[in-house]
Image (cartoon, rainbow, N blue to C red):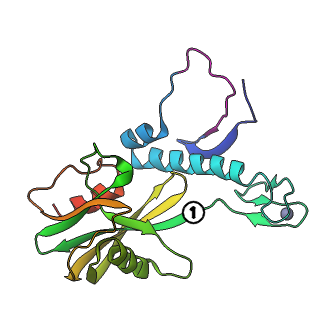
Amino acid sequence: LLQKEPLVTGYWHGKAVGIVELLTLPPEVHTTSIRSLLSVSNANVYSLLSHSLQILNSRREHAFCGCCGHEKNVKVGEWVMVCPECSHHAYPRISPCVIVLVTKGDEMLLVRHHRHGKQSTMHTLVAGFIEPGESAETAVHREVFEETGLTLGRLRYCFSQSWPFPHALMMGFHAEYESGELVLEEEELCFGGWFHRDAPPDLPPKFTIARKLVDLFI
Ligand SMILES: [Zn+2]
């Protein structure tokens, strides 16, 4: 049973593909989580899934105007939602974040987050949202200082990854440690420490930007 008309979000080998929202699932339909699909997909499928998921979320989030409350319309040929009353335009939201591999000689800085649960042994990188008015580079320096008390030397942008939970764009950096002792921001982090490149602990899965940044070094 279709809830709405299918929405074409892209093309795959010349054929239109998109999203269909279902009110009920036919018993023969097999379901899986988006996260698990992202983990096994190649870069092109990942991009298509990430795009489709964010367009779907945008249609939901911007169904009504944030300025005047009127129901919004889809602008044909674009992803923007437009208010017929006050012409407010709402583009799909993209939230830029920085994520940074900090190294000191042969060691790298890894942290564990409370949000991953006490049982988790996965170590990852310092990351955070870019604030309004801030450059990505400034955000790297600020996030690392706020979360670990360290200051950074040379900084290099590496690559980025769309992370559709719900609409982050992760911008990956490599930074060299400059000064300071580790002082953890304890509300967010439950552990932080230096690991030799030859003896990494449990790391995030291969498809994540955190792991791709670590893999540049180990
Ligand atoms: Zn409006």
The answer to whether 57 appears left or right of 122 in the picture is: right
Residue 47 in the magenta stretch? The answer is no
- Residue 69 pos. (x, y %): 84, 58
Most distant residue in the left direction: 198
Ligand 1 falls in quadrant: bottom right
Residue 21 in the magenta stretch? The answer is yes
Residue found at x 16% / y 52%: 201
Residue found at x 47% / y 57%: 162
The answer to whether 105 appears left or right of 89 in the picture is: left
The answer to whether 2 appears left or right of 71 in the picture is: left
Give the overall secondary structure of the magenta segment: loop
Residue found at x 57% / y 63%: 94
- Residue 58 pos. (x, y %): 66, 53
Can you say whether 118 is above or below 189 in the image?
A: above
Most distant residue in the top direction: 27
Magenta-colored span: 18-29
Can you say whether 3 is above or below 151 in the image?
A: above
Q: Which residue is mark 1?
A: 94
